[in-house]
Amino acid sequence: MLEPLPAPDLLSVLRAIVGERGLLTGADAEPYCQDWRALYRGRTPAVVRPAGTDELAAVVRLCVQRRIPMVPQGGNTSMVGGAVPSEGGEQLVISLARMNRIRDVDPLDLTMVVEAGAPWKAAQDAAAEQGCLLPLSISSEGTAQVGGILSTNAGGNNTLRYGNARDLVLGIEAVLPNGQVLHALRRLRKDNTGYALRHLLVGAEGTLGFITAAVLKLVPQPVQTEVALCAVPSPEAATALFRRCQLNDAASMQAFEYMSGTGMGFVLRHIPGATLPLATPAAHYALVELASTRRDGRLRESLESVLEAGLEAGLVEDAAIAESEAQRQAIWKLREEHAEAQKREGASVKNDVSVPISRVPELIARASAACEALIPGVRPVPFGHLGDGNIHFNLEQPPDWSASDFLARDEEIMHVVNEVVRDLGGSFSAEHGVGRLKPPMMREWRGGAELETMRRIKAALDPAGLMNPGKLFPAS
Amino acid sequence: MLEPLPAPDLLSVLRAIVGERGLLTGADAEPYCQDWRALYRGRTPAVVRPAGTDELAAVVRLCVQRRIPMVPQGGNTSMVGGAVPSEGGEQLVISLARMNRIRDVDPLDLTMVVEAGAPWKAAQDAAAEQGCLLPLSISSEGTAQVGGILSTNAGGNNTLRYGNARDLVLGIEAVLPNGQVLHALRRLRKDNTGYALRHLLVGAEGTLGFITAAVLKLVPQPVQTEVALCAVPSPEAATALFRRCQLNDAASMQAFEYMSGTGMGFVLRHIPGATLPLATPAAHYALVELASTRRDGRLRESLESVLEAGLEAGLVEDAAIAESEAQRQAIWKLREEHAEAQKREGASVKNDVSVPISRVPELIARASAACEALIPGVRPVPFGHLGDGNIHFNLEQPPDWSASDFLARDEEIMHVVNEVVRDLGGSFSAEHGVGRLKPPMMREWRGGAELETMRRIKAALDPAGLMNPGKLFPAS
């Protein structure tokens, strides 16, 4: 193993591998050093942008020889600072943005082969051109890249039907921490030949190597979609309505979202053009979306019948079904503007948690009470993917507090929420991962055999600890 | 680390952990030493049957101390000798059959918690009692146990809709090779907190520890099912029909199976009560099953319309839709008796292979030609899960050959089939795994970075190589 190179030599050696276009330094590198939530601002000797897998492998081998830590970066949309370098200035940022080809879309196999640097939206569009749907949908999909979405096992609105990012991956190509290339881009639905290495890389947040390309599962594009916004009397009613929708036509369920009256109130107050398609505001809401490839025009009937039964059973107080694509988008906007509306209302503390679906009402009741006991006047804004048990349990500041006074209490708030989540058998990070923000929680929540086994695997594949250091694992 | 114990001492130490009921020796142990295909007959000092996870963990810790190799065993239905000890007599068989409780079924969460030793059928029945379907279905489900099905990532008839065993696992409990218990029985749909250890254990064929319990995903029980048997002119037509069925109603597709006229001929000749529900025998057949939780009674209409369109397009020559549950079972019997009918016809060589779905027709054409060139008069009997690209490419002996002469050529036959499979980007083991039968193929097919990474993980978790030695990995 060679000694670390002084910076000027390092740059010239890197330039010999990736060329002038493949190297950014100085001001050009700065956008890569800060996460989009602006939680962290790091430094890097350079941003390396290899043009292909072989160049990347050569860069990794150099870094191993010279003991240079590497930070993989895709679209840099992490919610937990997972893709930026540390403040120390010794970590090399490696952006896969130039490795962005859509290699293949096959409508019969219902697969696509796509490189890590392609924005997710570009992959979605390529699939749509062939009449296929690349299912996963998240709000950052225009910027987030395939490699980042897979490395963080992203979720989103349609997980209840199609699963998380992990569930879409049939095959993978990767550069391992020792610079070897893992060639496993198999487009097979069944292949029982050894350990599922792709599932180790998916969700590893770049700590076990670079995903460079993947074979993703597609589905035929739905031709009918129906969306309803329902006023419901309680989270219990929302959960019972979800159950009825499943029994009615589980295979057509595309999304089932919960929103509180508080959060909806913020949206209606702060977001221009947001209007409630119901007669009166409610204490709780459910958004139901069905979609199908069937051409029988009966999806509307199916949605109406389950909502009517819900009305009769007292689970639904009022409901509006979108009559047009514009109305569909208007209903979804009420859901998607929750983050922006909270920002305009004041400071908020965010928790991306999950519990078993049946425990969502208890989560909302107990975590709300705990937060209100901690900070009288705080306004709980729970919303999110009820159909996955994934609630964004956010807390809006009391109206008469300053933002800074409120945010000074963020760790206490997260703690009381997480105590409830833990008691209900939940997780402290449903979708967003661990990144740099939450490693300390790993020791407490995943300690013992689980964390020890993760560390053994990490040490076996990356003995020098060069891949994305400081992320996912707590300091040992 | 202590020295290996002489056998009598070993038994008394084991008895102190698991009690008299937990230990089988002599003739009682013999059924555990032979696989059901009778490919292997091994020996063991004892069969240990722990009553629970803590007892199992104590046994594992003893084995680590005394360097005793362990062979996990469930229902012992492996197709590749994956669960039996070697001939050397030093490997301890550890049966999880007594750890067979259904801990919980939750119809709202659509999850069940089940221990490894429960027969899959028992888990299915417990789910059905709550109106839920545990999707995966394989012919050995009455005997195969949960732990074995997960450890081999079993497939089956409904994979195209619900995925393989892997896709059903939300949480896991396991005893690791060092005797630590991994407690990760989380019933969460979203949980991004570190490496997906469950996916490493699923499909690891017992080489990384013992799966002791799992949280499995359920779906609501379908209330409509429709099955058709279609005569089709070619594998290309079958594949095109599959595509049309997907576009028609992908979410209702429950199975899409291919059968050759040759195999169907054997079934009609040898299986009592098997009758063809079509006017005349055909060269190729497709079996289509749709299922839905919808109560609209329109699934039949949907199936009829896609088959009529197939008739008009020349993809279907004739079709029979089951009018009753008895007819449904009669159609499925034609498919399920393929193995038995081949046995009665004579000797056969079996290949469980997969290719991308679009390449199935080419697989059948090229592999048939290659086998006929190798052995004039050999009768190819391709059949299986076309919808997953998983074909059981079996070869029946020429009528005028002896079984032993034919079987003497089995390696040559497998080789020519696999050459085609490999050229089409396929896998040498779709469903059955590697076990003891196929480790030599791992070097050739999964060599380089892939096998090396698997070995690193194995060494990290099981440094003494005590877990199921001789399985999955080729000798190094």
Image: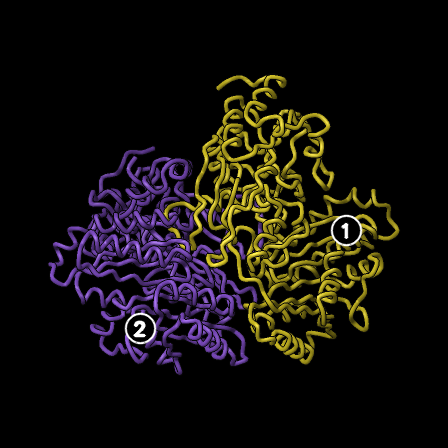
Chain colours: A yellow, B purple
Q: Which mark is residue A82?
A: none
Q: Residues within 10 Å of mark 2 (few under 14, many from 20)?
A: some
Quadrant of the frame with the C terminus of chain B: top left
> At 67% across and 26% down in the image, what residue appears?
A25
The residue under label 2 is which amino acid type?
Answer: Lys
Q: Tell me the quarter of the picture where residue A41 sits.
A: top right
Q: Which mark is residue A374?
A: 1
B383 shown above or below A462: below
Q: Which residue is mark 2?
A: B333
Q: Residues within 10 Å of mark 1 (few under 14, many from 20)?
A: some
The image position of residue A175, as x and y in percent, is 49, 35
> At 57% across and 28% down in the image, what residue appears?
A18
- Tag 1 secondary structure: helix
Looking at the picture, do discs 2 and 1 lie on one chain?
A: no
Quadrant of the frame with the N terminus of chain B: top left
The image position of residue A16, as x and y in percent, is 56, 22
Q: Which marked residue is nearer to the observer: mark 2 or mark 1?
A: 2
Query: In this rendering, would B223 be left or right of A45?
Result: left
Check the image and name the residue furthest to the front.
B313
The image position of residue A421, as x and y in percent, is 64, 54
Check the image and name the residue furthest to the bottom.
B323
Of the pair B57 and A268, the residue shown nearer to us: A268
The residue under label 1 is which amino acid type?
Answer: Leu
- Marked residue chain, label 1: A
Check the image and name the residue furthest to the right.
A400
Q: How many marks?
A: 2
- The reply to whether residue B458 is visible in this rendering is yes
